[in-house]
Each structure stands twice: as C-alpha cells, then as structure tokens.
Amino acid sequence: MDTISQGKTPHLPATVSVMSQSSSRVRFVVKSTHDPLAEDGPNVIRNLSLSPKKISAVYVYDQLGSQLFEQQCRTPEYYLRRAEAVLLKAYAGDIVRQSGVLPIVELGAGTAEKTRILLAEYARRGARCDYFPIDVDVDTLAAAAHGLAEDYPKLFVHCLGGTYEECLAVLPRDGRPRLFLFLGSSLGNMEWHEMQALLARISRHTAPGDHLLVGADLDKDPAIIDRAYNDAAGFGARSTLNMLTHLNWRYGGDFAMDQFAYRSVYDAGARRNEVRIESLARQTVTLRNLELRIALGESELIDAEVMWKFEPTELTQLLENAGFSMMREWIEPIYRYGIFLLRRQ
Ligand SMILES: C[S@@+](CC[C@H](N)C(=O)[O-])C[C@H]1O[C@@H](n2cnc3c(N)ncnc32)[C@H](O)[C@@H]1O
C-alpha cells in the first residue's frame, strides 16, 4: 500500500531500514576497493615460465569463479560442502562450549554459508559476535558480509579483502582470544610447503588461548573423489577454466576457451587430486598487459589446483608442528570428512 498517497508521514519500507541498520555493522578493515592481485603480474609470468606451466589457484576466485564454485558445491557429487555442514550442525554446540564464545576470524570465508551454523549457535546464546572474514574475492566477501549482518542482529563484520598473508598482517587484535576458522578443506588446496608456511604464519598471528577449527577432506575410495571433481553438470570444470577468463580480463589475455579442457585426476599414492588445464592445440596466447607470449603445445598440461586428502594423524602432526594442540576431532563416516578443533599452545 502506498503510504504517501494516504497522507501519512512517508517512511522507508521495513526491509530498507533493516538493511541500513545492518550495514552499520559492516566495516572494511582493508579498503573495499583494494585489489589483492593488482601486483601479482610478476608471479603470473614466473608461473607460466615454469615447466610444467602453472596458474596459481587464487585465479579461480574472481566473482564469477566464486559463483561457479558455489554451484559446484551444490552438485550431488560434491560431498565436501554437505559433509562439513552435517558435522558443524551436529557439533556447533560442542565447539562453542569448548572454545568459548570468541570473536571469529575466517580464512577464505567465501559466501560463509557454513559459518552461519556457528553464528546461529552464538545467536542462540544471545551473544554479540565480532567476525573477521578474510577472502581474496572482495566482491563476494562484501556481499556475504551484508547478508550475514542482515540475518544476525548482534553480528559485527570486519571485512578483510586480500590474501591470507596480507590480511593476517593487518588483523586487528584487542587481547581477547579468538576462534580461527579454516573450512572447506581450503588448507588442502596448497602445496605441502605452502601449508606449512601459512600455518606458521597463522601461529605467529595467534596467541595461547586462541582456537583453530579446520575442515579437511580425508582419503577415501578414489571413485568418490573422482566424481566430486568431475560433476555431471560441469561446474567443477567451469570454475577451474574460469582461471583463463580471469587472466583474460585482468591482463588483456586472449585465451580461447574452446581451445582448452579441464582434467582432474586423483593420485591415490600421493593422496591428492590434481587438476590441470589441457591445451587442445598448438597455440600461442598473449597476456598483453604483462607483455607475455605463451607458446603451448598440443596436449600440454598446465598445473591449476591440488586438493590433498589427508589422514587424520598426518593432519594432526602438521597442525601440531605449527604450535596447535588437538582438542577434538569429528569425522563424518560416510564420506570421510573431518573437522578438527585445536588450541594454540
Ligand atoms: C575452497 S573455497 C572455500 C570457501 C568456504 N570457506 C567454504 O568452505 O565453502 C576457498 C576460498 O578461499 C578464498 N581464497 C583462496 N585463496 C586465497 C588466498 N590466498 N587468500 C585469501 N583467500 C583465498 C577463495 O576466494 C574462496 O572463497
């Protein structure tokens, strides 16, 4: 009904006033206009000069890539998202009881879909929550932050758009212990030495009393893993191939999308899934803004992503070496996916 034509005082629709109240609970610690990959050109050149060539996995996640990843997560084959959500729903109460109601810092928050399960647990306790999501995809981060603030009236979101490294360096601290989240098995999307380096960095930016909750995919029947990364709808393939689209818009590239294919193989011996992009023809690609010409052979493979499938003991060792002690672990038995709660020593 039109309130103005009825001669009443015009007022904003309820949804708008709720939006503006919630917006006041969202702030950007790192400027929302910051472009985390603005200075990354030299790394792109270096990686594409290696043999085999490589594109850093961070190029999956521009806004379109994050949307494609979300769609992949909703496919029937992609068990990781659902298994982690099942565990969080079952054990959110235990997690909060063990760690306490702490400010939350999340690495690679993305759309923060599953974080909502913990935030709902805080909300049930009537607790205020300061939430510090970190993500290299600043647009998705901002959208998620506003959505969360609308849904949780006691939530204050302090956004950090940037790489893990740069955001950890500027993460505000007020002396209270914090709960760090690293979900979605994102830790396993790195080479082993990169995991060690990142965990050491997290350790330097935490203090005794801080907690860390890690979601990690575990080794299992290779067929289950194979299906997850080769979903019938093709969202896994599209999210990886989006790396080329991303390079095209960011660096003035001319990767022709129909000249490349997605390849995903599980190496059961190494316990890691390996995703590559295959050049379907002999071709030359140019990244104009980097003054880079890339010669590719027919069937040449470019390294794109890795997904480690851990054993709980080795994951425990990795995390304990970084200065965290294991408090609890919960494993979803059907798909073998785990969440691990640790305390900084
Ligand atoms: C595998 S997704 C997981 C998203 C979400 N946590 C979940 O569990 O569904 C990884 C997320 O980390 C972000 N990310 C990847 N590499 C990053 C980096 N080096 N620094 C900061 N964020 C990164 C991506 O933008 C993406 O949102």
Image: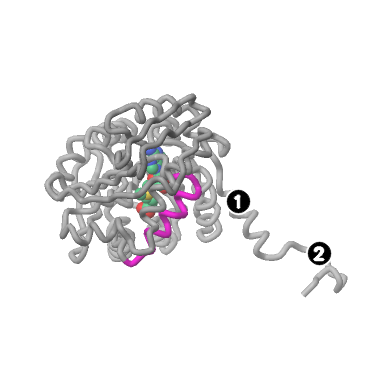
Query: For residue 10, which numbered disc appears in the image?
Result: 2
Question: Considering only vertical position in the picture, is 211 above or below 68?
Answer: above
- Looking at the image, do the residues carrying marks 1 and 2 touch, with CB atoms under 8 Å apart? no
**Is 259 a magenta residue?**
no
Q: Amino acid at mark 1?
A: Ser
Q: Amino acid at mark 2?
A: Pro
Q: Cβ(mark 1) to ligand 1 < 8 Å?
A: no
- Residue 16 in view here: yes
Q: Which residues are magenta?
A: 61-76
Q: In terms of secondary structure, what is the magenta stretch mainly?
A: helix
- Residue 101 in view here: no
* Residue at 50% over, 48% down: 63
Question: Considering only vertical position in the picture, is 56 above or below 117?
Answer: above
**Residue 326, horizontal then vertical, whole percent:** 19, 46
Residue nearest the viewer, comparing 311 with 52: 52
Determine which residue is flagged by label 1: 23
Q: For the residue labelled by badge 2, is the local secondary structure a helix, a strand or a loop?
A: loop
Query: For residue 311, which numbered disc appears in the image?
Result: none
Q: For the residue labelled by badge 1, is the local secondary structure a helix, a strand or a loop?
A: helix
Q: Cβ(mark 2) to ligand 1 < 8 Å?
A: no
- Quarter holding the N terminus is bottom right
Q: Quadrant of ligand 1?
A: top left
First in sequence: mark 1 or mark 2?
Answer: 2
Question: Considering only vertical position in the picture, is 47 above or below 266?
Answer: above
* Residue at 25% over, 39% down: 344
Residue nearest the viewer, comparing 281 with 83: 281
Neighbour tally class for label 2: few under 14, some 14-19, many 20 plus, Cα within 10 Å:
few
